[in-house]
């Protein structure tokens, strides 16, 4: 079989007519399928429903040190919740602050504090002419949304299978003191599924930065979200905190994580971890804005997940539900597109996404065709700063929400739409 690029115009025209007819047939079915956001499926949410019944009496609401969690207090989190989240982010519990239901809020607040007050004695970023930020791309659209909201100039840096293009990162941070930070999803990255190599982690920790207040925003959202049992050996991630300390830059990182995709999104607990100096400053500033986060939810999570082992056992149940979905996406892409040519996609070992690259100039059109046919995808371009994908190629596939049968249907629609978009492009 020739690939599409090898076909003559006549053959392509015939193919286009067939694909258009197929697209029209799908449209007529009035489907409403969604592969847009990385939401757990209902069966995954069911796994955590028993957690909701764990606090039934006043006595249940007491923390291990006797704190009555129904009342005000405890700004930085219950000691047992700090231990649980410390296990997740590989940090000393003293260097952890447990937050509310969203790590994204903690990231926004961290940028806002740097913006308004500066960090560890440096000038507030709001006083500077320009603030720039490194954005490994494709990346997480909501990260880019935060930096865009502050008017921070976002500089895309290519993502590779080992992490960001570190030659480029080192060049940019060394030469420009207005470059203040970088977004990192270091494990099973959103959307590519890459886990940073030791070399990338070490170089981030040790690189010469023109800005004394440069910060690595280490969003380890998928730190325990493995799909395979051999993750401990195959997908090990070097600890950025240890690497920064070793390199003599102990204050360079802010780690983030949450239980959004462990228990219940929007009803989990989150954490920020950093050096003792950073944590002292975070607590001082945070204390102006809250008396403390939801300790009852912290207790529920500790009683439900218990410790690193309990967490791992719970995540293995998620993996058992998710693996067939990721396998199905790969099989459908292979079946629908392998012979078409020009397409490539990730085969992640964890996390929530498959990163798909359509032939150049086809992503927007493919997503629009899918929308017309009743399948909602993440907007094309969303994985790049300012939603500008220079190749108009990357599409994030989020296969976790739909049940398997719906996912199969949605993937068939998607591959049809990619093919039609490609044929249209080849025919000009
Ligand atoms: N960080 C990454 C990389 C994500 O993919 C997501 C959700 O998709 C989040 C953060 C959101 O986390 P939270 O629910 O804790 O705000």
Image (cartoon, helix red, strand yellow):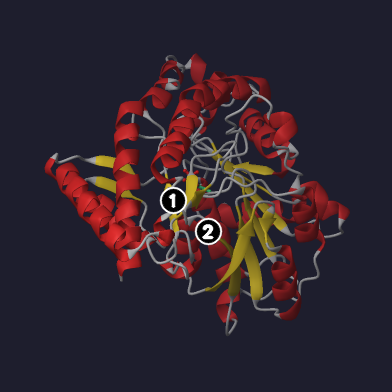
In this view, 368 is above or below 304: below
Residue 400 picture location, percent across and down? 41, 35
Give the residue drawn at x 70%, y 70%: 168
Q: For label 2, count other residues whose C-alpha is less than 10 Å away and answer few (under 14), some (14-19) or many (20+).
A: many
Residue 112 picture location, percent across and down? 53, 64
Residue found farthest to the bottom: 129
Residue 220 picture location, percent across and down? 61, 45
- Mark 1 vs 2, N-terminal side: 2
The answer to whether residue 185 of the structure is visible from this angle is yes
In this view, 165 is above or below 242: below
The residue under label 2 is 138
Asked if the residues shown at circle 1 and circle 2 are in contact, with their CB atoms under 8 angstroms apart, the answer is: yes
The residue under label 1 is 396
Give the residue drawn at x 34%, y 52%: 419
Helix, strand or loop status at disc 2? loop
In this view, 216 is above or below 92: below
Give the residue drawn at x 75%, y 39%: 92
Q: For label 1, count other residues whose C-alpha is less than 10 Å away and answer few (under 14), some (14-19) or many (20+).
A: many
Residue 426's disc is none
């Amino acid at each position: 079989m020739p690939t599409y690029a090898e076909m003559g115009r006549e053959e392509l025209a015939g193919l286009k007519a067939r694909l258009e007819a197929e697209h029209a047939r799908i449209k007529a079915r009035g489907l409403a399928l969604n592969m847009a956001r990385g939401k757990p499926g209902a069966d995954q949410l069911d796994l955590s429903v028993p957690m909701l019944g764990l606090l039934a009496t006043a006595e249940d609401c007491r923390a291990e040190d006797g704190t009555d969690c129904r009342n005000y207090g405890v700004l930085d989190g219950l000691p047992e919740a700090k231990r649980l989240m410390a296990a997740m982010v590989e940090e000393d519990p003293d260097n952890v602050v447990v937050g509310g239901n969203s790590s994204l809020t903690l990231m926004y607040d961290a940028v806002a504090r740097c913006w308004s007050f500066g960090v560890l004695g440096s000038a507030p970023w709001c006083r500077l002419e320009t603030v720039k930020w490194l954005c490994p791309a494709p990346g997480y659209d909501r990260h880019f949304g935060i930096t865009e909201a502050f008017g921070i100039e976002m500089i895309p840096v290519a993502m590779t299978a080992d992490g960001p293009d570190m030659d480029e990162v080192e060049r940019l941070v060394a030469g420009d003191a207005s470059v203040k930070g970088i977004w990192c999803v270091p494990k099973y990255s959103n959307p590519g599924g890459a886990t940073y190599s030791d070399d990338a982690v070490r170089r981030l920790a040790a690189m010469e930065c023109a800005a004394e207040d440069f910060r690595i925003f280490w969003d380890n959202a998928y730190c325990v979200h493995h799909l395979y049992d051999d993750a401990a050996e195959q997908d090990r991630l070097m600890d950025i905190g240890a690497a920064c300390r070793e390199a003599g830059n102990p204050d360079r990182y802010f780690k983030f994580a949450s239980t959004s995709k462990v228990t219940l999104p929007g009803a989990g607990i989150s954490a920020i971890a950093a050096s003792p100096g950073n944590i002292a400053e975070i607590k001082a500033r945070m204390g102006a804005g809250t008396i403390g986060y939801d300790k009852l939810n912290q207790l529920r999570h500790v009683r439900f997940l218990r410790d690193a082992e309990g967490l791992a056992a719970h995540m293995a149940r998620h993996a058992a539900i998710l693996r067939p979905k990721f396998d199905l996406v790969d099989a459908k892409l292979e079946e629908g597109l392998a012979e078409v040519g020009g397409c490539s996609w990730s085969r992640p070992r964890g996390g929530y996404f498959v990163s798909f690259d359509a032939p150049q100039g086809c992503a927007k059109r493919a997503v629009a065709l899918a929308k017309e046919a009743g399948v909602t995808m993440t907007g094309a371009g969303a994985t790049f700063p300012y939603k500008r994908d220079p190749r108009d190629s990357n599409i994030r596939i989020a296969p976790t929400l739909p049940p398997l049968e719906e996912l199969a249907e949605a993937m068939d629609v998607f591959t049809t739409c990619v093919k039609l978009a490609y044929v249209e492009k080849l025919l000009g």
